[in-house]
Image (cartoon, rainbow, N blue to C red):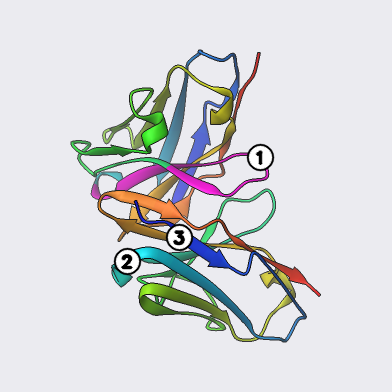
Amino acid sequence: EIVLTQSPATLSLSPGERATLSCGASQSVSSSYLAWYQQKPGLAPRLLIYDASNRATGIPDRFSGSGSGTDFTLIISRLEPEDFAVYYCQQYGNSLITFGQGTRLEIK
Amino acid sequence: QVQLVDSGGGLVKPGGSLTLSCAASGFTFSDYYMSWIRQAPGKGLEWVSYISSSGSNKYYLDSVKGRFTISRDNAKNSLYLQMNSLRAEDTAVYYCARLLLGSGDYWGQGTLVTVSS
């Protein structure tokens, strides 16, 4: 089983700032199967990025994903008030799906 | 538009059973893998199970193997999760999700399962 570790656990930033979220894998992940989600309280997660770097339908271009192998990054270039939420990375490999523990992005 | 509606959650005693349903619309259900993901109160996301488009292949989280069964009815555009021998640690909101290239591109609203005496 591939374990995903997200850092930091909590990120405190102000609107307009740049956010960098990391996701490390215990073994190499096929970049075709690395995704990022945003979740707000009381709501289902929303897919932001799939295949490590492709934005899902309707996702603003301030969200970008990159990485390969065991290190992946989600960048939010300029934070909007609605971006403060919890973010999860997720991988699919060897017929199993695993999630990272999440990064809480909070308003400073 | 794509819509997934989860139902069937509720309060059940330890050792009891429950069946969750997910009604799909707005896409060709039989073309997609489908999955169940859960979230315990205040915790992160945990994948539970997924099923291939035809229903012939099924995969499970180790802790639910032998207790949970995923199934689908492509004629009814529906996904199911039969949960037996429920434990307190199965308490969570359960979401169904459509899988595309290994990621959940559409999710249901979730249904709460509470296992308590």
Could you tell me residue B62's position as x and y percent? 36, 35
Q: Residue B74, located in which quarter of the rendered image?
A: top left
Q: Residue at x 69, y 53 (%)?
A: A41
Q: Residues within 10 Å of mark 1 (few under 14, many from 20)?
A: few
Q: Residue A38, located in which quarter of the rendered image?
A: bottom right
- Image height of A42 relative to B116, above or below: below
- Image height of B70 relative to B29, above or below: above
Residue annotated with mark 3 = A4
Residue annotated with mark 2 = A29
Q: Residues within 10 Å of mark 2 (few under 14, many from 20)?
A: many
- Give the residue type that dot 1 points to: Pro
- Give the extent of the magenta segment: B31-47
Q: Secondary structure at mark 1?
A: loop
Residue annotated with mark 1 = B41
Q: Residue B14, located in which quarter of the rendered image?
A: top right
Could you tell me residue A16's position as x and y percent? 73, 86
